[in-house]
């Protein structure tokens, strides 16, 4: 009797949660449609997110894309900090794959570590440096511990903004292994621009929003799977010529398309146009 009652309660609670979730999702969608339909102008940071807004009622004639800016005076190439290397247990001969940012469940890090594990075990100089924390941190740490990779997968936690560039410069290759979901397809992760500004050769899963800004065949190497990303990253670590070429392309791209002052000017011009269109 007790077991049956517990089952009934758990089932009823689960059904209630689902209903609440569905109701919450409908409320969010209603709010989105109301805002998009009534806004004087909508600005997004990539074409995929712009189309998402249009599909939900935004006026295409009153919507535009302005890429985010990046502070190239802060995020720029430079030598790695020997002191930070030592504090993390890194040596100058280590080959470092780097991830930076919030560790969401859709970040793909759990799956990437699973794919990288054989390469990590076979090469003690290969390291994965994870900068940041988030909802999936505990699960990721547990995987690293169970896989006996504590000396290969380094997780120093959240890094203060003022020190971030010095930590990014520890990487030889940067990765964005996001799972391919709606939230990631509509995103333009700021971490990628910071990777590129620091001259880090960057690998990413095929995300529609990111690819609309930086198409395949340019500064980012796109992977169709994390198995492919894992293999490509390890190959790239042994190809200094390709890394140098990608690094130079990355820095040039940031200066050309994401210059902070230029993007601010574009935003100010957009605001002026919107204000001038409003009835006096």
Image (cartoon, rainbow, N blue to C red):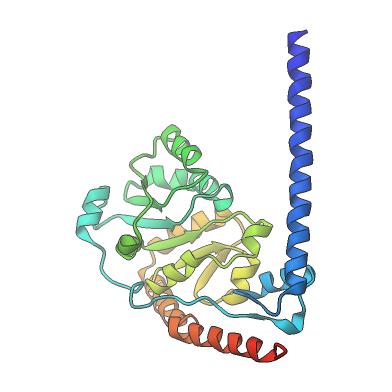
Where in the figure is residue 108, as x and y percent of width and height? Answer: 55, 50
- Can residue 102 be seen here? The reply is yes
- Can residue 215 be seen here? The reply is no
261 and 186: which is toward the camera: 261
The structure residue drawn at horizontal position 74% and vertical position 44%, both measured from the top left corner, is 21
In the displayed image of the protein, which residue is found farthest to the top?
Answer: 1
Image quadrant holding the N terminus, namely: top right
Where in the figure is residue 178, as x and y percent of width and height? Answer: 57, 56
Where is 275 relative to 88, above or below?
A: below
Image quadrant holding the C terminus, namely: bottom right
Determine whether, in the image, residue 105 is placed left or right of residue 143. right
The structure residue drawn at horizontal position 59% and vertical position 85%, both measured from the top left corner, is 271
Residue 153 occupies which quadrant of the picture? top left
The structure residue drawn at horizontal position 49% and vertical position 75%, both measured from the top left corner, is 219
Where in the figure is residue 18, as x and y percent of width and height? Answer: 76, 39
Determine whether, in the image, residue 89 is placed left or right of residue 259. left
In the displayed image of the protein, which residue is found farthest to the front?
Answer: 280
Where is 276 relative to 86, above or below?
A: below
Where in the figure is residue 186, as x and y percent of width and height? Answer: 65, 65
The mark tally for this picture is: 0
Where is 87 relative to 6, above or below?
A: below
274 and 104: which is toward the camera: 274
234 and 127: which is toward the camera: 127
């Amino acid at each position: 009797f007790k077991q049956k009652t517990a089952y009934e309660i758990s089932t009823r609670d689960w059904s209630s949660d689902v209903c609440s979730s569905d109701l919450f999702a409908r409320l969010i969608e209603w709010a989105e449609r109301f805002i998009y339909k009534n806004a004087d102008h909508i600005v997004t940071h990539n074409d995929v997110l712009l189309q998402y807004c249009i599909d939900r009622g935004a006026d295409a004639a009153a919507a535009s894309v302005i890429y985010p800016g990046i502070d190239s005076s802060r995020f720029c190439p430079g030598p790695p900090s020997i002191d930070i290397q030592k504090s993390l247990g890194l040596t100058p001969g280590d080959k470092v794959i780097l991830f930076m940012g919030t560790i969401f469940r859709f970040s793909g890090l759990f799956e990437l570590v699973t794919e990288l594990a054989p390469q990590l075990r076979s090469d003690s100089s290969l390291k994965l440096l994870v900068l940041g924390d988030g909802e999936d941190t505990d699960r990721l740490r547990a995987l690293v511990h169970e896989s006996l990779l504590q000396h290969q997968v380094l997780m120093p936690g959240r890094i203060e903004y003022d020190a971030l560039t010095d930590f990014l410069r520890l990487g030889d290759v940067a990765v964005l292994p996001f799972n391919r979901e709606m939230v990631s397809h509509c995103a333009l992760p700021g971490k990628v621009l910071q990777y590129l500004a620091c001259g880090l050769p960057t690998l990413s899963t095929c995300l529609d929003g990111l690819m609309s800004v930086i198409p395949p065949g340019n500064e980012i190497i796109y992977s169709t799977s994390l198995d492919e990303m894992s293999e490509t990253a390890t190959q790239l670590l042994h190809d200094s010529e390709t890394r140098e070429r990608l690094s130079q392309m990355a820095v040039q791209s940031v200066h050309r398309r994401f210059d902070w002052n230029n993007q601010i000017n574009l935003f100010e011009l957009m605001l002026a146009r919107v204000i001038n269109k409003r009835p006096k």
